Amino acid sequence: AQRDKIESLLAEMTLEEKIGQMNQESPSIVGGFEVPFGELIEMVTDGRLSNAEFKKIMSTAQQDCHEDEIRTGGVGSLMVQDPAKTNELQKIAVEESRLGIPLLFGLDVIHGYRTVYPIALAEACTFDPALMKKTARMAARESHSGGVAWHFAPMVDIARDARWGRVSEGPGEDPCLASAFARAKIEGLQEPEQADDPYVAACLKHYVGYGACEGGRDYNTVNMAMSLFYSVYLQPFQAAVRSGAQTAMAAFNDLNGVPCTVNKFLLRDVLKDTLGLPGFVVSDANAIKECVSHGIAADDRDAGVQAACAGLDMDMGTNIYKNHLKEAVESGQVPMEVIDDAVRRILSVKMWLGLFDNPYLTEEEMHRFDTLPQEHLALAREAGEKSIVLLKNEGNVLPLSPEKKIALVGSLADDREEVVGAWALSWRKEDCVSIRAGMEKAFPNLQYFPCGGPEGDMNADEIQRAGAYGDVVVAVLGETKAMSGEASSRADVTLPGKQRELLEKLLGFGKPVVLVLMNGRPLALEWEDRHVPAIVEAWHLGVQMGHAVANVLSGKAMPEGKLSASFPAMTGQCPVYYNHPSTGRPASKSKFTSKYLDAPLDSLYPFGHGLSYTSFALSDLQVNDAGEALDIRVKVENTGDRAGVETVQFYMQDVAASIVRPVKELKGFVKVRLAPGEKTKAAFSLPKQDMGFFDDQWKYRLENGVFRIFAGSSSRECISEEVAVCFS
Ligand code: BGC
């Protein structure tokens, strides 16, 4: 029936109306302030205007929501998030346009809507797909009530270079973990739990390879062997499409010379025809036009023709389809089938969402989350606690008993807006809990001394007073939310500004110092690791950050996060990732090996690393061939004096293969909760089908031979066994 409805609509549509469906608009800012909009943006960029002032101006700015265009059927999708406004615009589309096709409202809902959860890089550290699914479910319910039916998420770009600001938005460096994340997010966003539970369409991004931008510089070129592309970068997209992901966004970058926006091979052959994406592909913002700057298109029209023919179905923000496609179809440059295919796909997503039957939000839906349910905040707190990674805890400085006199230092600690991290658009300040607020509740003898932050100077007076107060110093340092995310690559990933000097001064008082990090990327912490006894990676954890941090520092919650990306010792090591291909000369102390003269041989904290307040020991690894799968078991013991959770990680290495393979690849993980002294067996069944890799022709190879199987508490701390495997 759905197909029939689409076909009959298609038969009725004029070419203009079809192209209208392929056009996405954002409200244009048309005035209401003194200077031109472009200059306003420049003023924010160069600091003449603060973010707060800019926000204030924008809240009263006059917007054009393209009502006339909607009326004529010229708009398929809009980026709006005001529920009353979406209803108003939807009414124009449904009741006043000739065919009454509903609009699709999309928005960046990257890590939560009103309830902001940890940034994706942090949430991946939970190694807990059930939790990842829950946060996505909550985000879908909340955004739906805000009028948003389509999330530009999940972002599943594998990212191995800490310099790239957008590592914050995705699940890190490993394809197995990223695929688990991708599946969980698709299920959470798209699958309602009961009949009246709202759902949204996911948009996988950025398709594809964006995370491999050269040098970690945003929007930069991407070059890679196709075997690496298929075996690593494509993996989470493939997993997500298998889970039913409806749509995808083409990435800004070129892959091996052809921008993804106009890459027919990637869009049509791989994503649609082979993987089977059911819905459509949208461009990234302005990306069709940028094909001219890429030097792949002569002008706007040429870019539009190439993009449409490549299978790019919807134009985000350039109006190139709207302005040029009609003529391009009439002159035969773009076949009508291309247009029809795009429109079919777009209409099918609108139907899948139920927009033809229920285009409007009811009053009840619109106000469902006016007061945030406790359940949402509790989930944000839980996700926050589980995302925290204890990097170092020498001499068991942590946990801190509640009576401790604590000097809390760092301006980030007292900033409730910074907790939401990059790409959070729909939060409210009143929901945000700063680290200071959370800590003051948990530690009655705490005093706060700002001292300084990632930007600006340090206050010597306050440093003195902080050093004089109390038993222990907790320094909250790191990055502002603007230092990661889009267009926020950094060439130096150490603590920004004068924060290291601040730490040095604090350490000079001779009291134990706990460094709590707030940041959106792996940082280079060689100096900090050498000097600071306790280091807690707390990322940007979302609206409940303060409580999550306080609970972990006090031991009310046990730290259990494991790094989703390796931390370099020094920026010059980037990209550094645990699952790198074997070289002929693995790094060692001897001279002619693959290393730097002036850096450690490996990352500082590897993928999968994360301590607890108790300790665990792994022993007795057994690997048995069970026919279709390898049956892997390892003994895990809680050797400390507290209950805790260990994430046991299972890796493999294909010892000799026809293409150089990674030194180690994560294949699965199991979380175990153990009381002090308790032992258990962690078991994992590795399907033999999953032990292969793709070659440059996308052929999956399962090659007989010896495999090394590892079980570990990180990608570095492992025990291993060798096993010969025969696939045929
Ligand atoms: C970003 C996308 C985002 C889009 C729409 C672009 O600049 O690259 O990730 O979804 O804007 O806001």
Image (tube, rainbow, N blue to C red):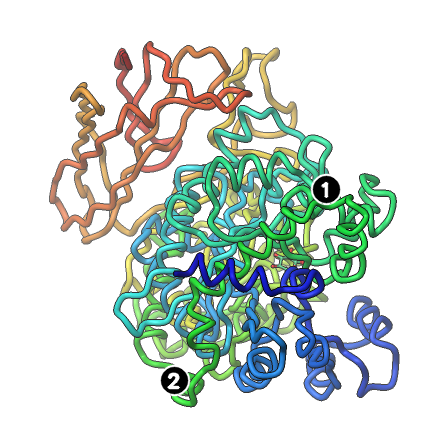
Please give the name of the residue rendered at 83% of the width and 46% of the height, measured from the top-left corner: 292
Observer-nearest residue: 213 or 587? 213
First-in-chain label (1 vs 2): 1
Please give the name of the residue rendered at 60% of the width and 81% of the height, measured from the top-left corner: 89
Q: Quadrant of residue 628?
A: top left
Residue 415 in view: no
Q: Is residue 649 left or right of residue 519?
A: left
Question: Horizontal and vertical percent for residue 590?
Answer: 56, 12
Q: Amino acid at mark 1?
A: Asn
Kindly identify which numbered label has been placed on residue 614: none
Is ligand 1 closer than 8 angstroms to the Cβ of mark 1? no
Q: Quadrant of the C terminus?
A: top left
Please give the name of the residue rendered at 42% of the width and 69% of the height, measured from the top-left corner: 354
Q: Quadrant of residue 678?
A: top left
- Local secondary structure at mark 1: loop
Residue 442 in view: yes
Observer-nearest residue: 298 or 57? 298
Q: Quadrant of the N terminus?
A: bottom left
Q: Which residue is mark 1?
A: 220
Question: Horizontal and vertical percent for residue 207?
Answer: 58, 45
Mark 2: give few (<14), some (14-19) or many (20+) Cα within 10 Å: some
Q: Is residue 636 left or right of residue 609?
A: left
Instruction: Using the numbered discs, state the Cα–Cα distance from disc 1 to disc 2 in whole angstroms.
Output: 42 Å
Q: Amino acid at mark 2?
A: Arg
* Contact check, label 1 and label 2, Cβ < 8 Å: no
Kindly identify which numbered label has been placed on residue 368: 2
